[in-house]
């Protein structure tokens, strides 16, 4: 597999690093394309990959193109590479808000996979969802699973779900961090040293997520296992259940999904 990253920011770097770490691709088979000389220099020195500032050169040197520029720069990028696309190329787009229909219209290409990763790919714990255009082959879907599963977990879902996916797993890390900070602040108010509240909250949240993922237990069953009748967990849960937290979280996801639909339509 010869793969080129068109746009070499933090997200592209995380995916690139995962490919190398998991030995899914050799360094000499990766080409990073970016307008920033500093980014090109950084990636060449750290990962020993080839670099270029010319997207057309990158397209000609690779079979797989990861479209990783900012959404507002994607139209110009696809206009530049369109004349160089051939049936062998597979486009993996991580540009937020760019639908398969728009990607195909701009590129004139059929083998396109749209992907919504999240920031956690930078530490190998990303959650990515992808959907494939009608012109894709089974191998293209397996490719997306391999590339993005290499930096966390990846799941294929119909494109009609992408606004909700954007709200949950795309924006979700920020919502989780907000909740984490609130828990840490509340713990500090109970007298815990400020220096350790964030560690305690983060590891607790991470541990709960790992248990749920690795055991497949339902959240309700996990809650029941932690909460003894009349105990401390039950006392806290009573406050949560009596509050409007569920309604607030529902509104949070709804607002993010609505904004995703607006951006896709613009």
Image: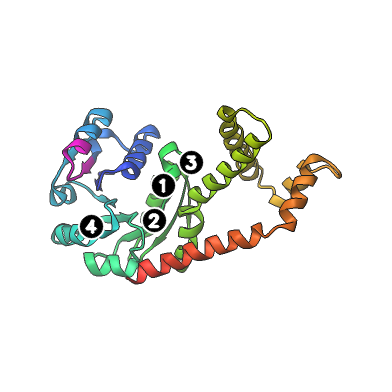
Is residue 240 toward the left or the right of residue 209 in the image? right
**Above or below 63: residue 231:** above
Label 4 secondary element = helix
- The residue sitting at 56% across, 28% down in the picture is 195
Residue 180's image quarter? top right
Residue 125: numbered disc: 3
Q: Quadrant of the N terminus?
A: top left
Q: Are marks 1 and 3 in contact (CB under 8 Å)?
A: no
Give the camera-side residue of 139 and 124: 124
Residue 129 x/y as whole percent: 45, 55
**Above or below 59: residue 164:** below
**Above or below 137: residue 148:** above
Residue assigned mark 2: 115
Specify whether residue 218 is in view: no
- Gap between marks 1 and 3 measured at Cα: 10 Å
- The residue sitting at 25% across, 47% down in the picture is 7
Give the camera-side residue of 161 and 166: 166
Q: Which residues are magenta?
A: 31-40
Residue assigned mark 1: 148
Residue assigned mark 4: 73
Label 3 secondary element = loop
- The residue sitting at 53% across, 65% down in the picture is 254
Residue 56 x/y as whole percent: 14, 52
């Amino acid at each position: 597999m010869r793969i080129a990253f068109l746009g070499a920011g933090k997200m592209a770097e995380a995916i690139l690093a995962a490919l190398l770490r998991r030995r899914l691709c050799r360094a000499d088979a990766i080409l990073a394309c970016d307008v920033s000389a500093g980014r090109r220099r950084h990636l060449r020195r750290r990962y020993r990959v080839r670099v270029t500032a010319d997207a057309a050169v990158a397209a000609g040197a690779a079979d797989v193109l990861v479209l990783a520029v900012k959404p507002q720069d994607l139209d110009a990028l696809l206009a530049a590479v369109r004349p160089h696309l051939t049936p062998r190329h597979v486009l993996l787009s991580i540009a937020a808000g760019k639908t398969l229909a728009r990607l195909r219209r701009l590129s004139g290409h059929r083998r396109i996979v749209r992907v919504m990763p999240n920031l956690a790919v930078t530490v190998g714990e990303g959650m990515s969802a992808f959907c494939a255009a009608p012109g894709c082959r089974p191998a293209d879907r397996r490719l997306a699973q391999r590339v993005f599963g290499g930096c966390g977990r990846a799941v294929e879902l119909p494109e009609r779900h992408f606004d909700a996916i954007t709200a949950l797993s795309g924006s979700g890390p920020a919502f989780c961090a907000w909740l984490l900070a609130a828990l840490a602040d509340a713990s500090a108010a109970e007298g815990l040293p400020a220096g350790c509240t964030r560690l305690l909250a983060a590891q607790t949240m991470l541990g709960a997520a790992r248990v749920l993922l690795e055991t497949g237990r339902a959240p309700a069953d996990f809650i029941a296992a932690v909460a003894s009748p009349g105990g401390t967990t039950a006392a806290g849960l009573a406050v949560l259940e009596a509050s409007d937290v569920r309604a607030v979280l529902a509104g949070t996801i709804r607002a993010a999904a609505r904004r995703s639909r607006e951006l896709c339509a613009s």
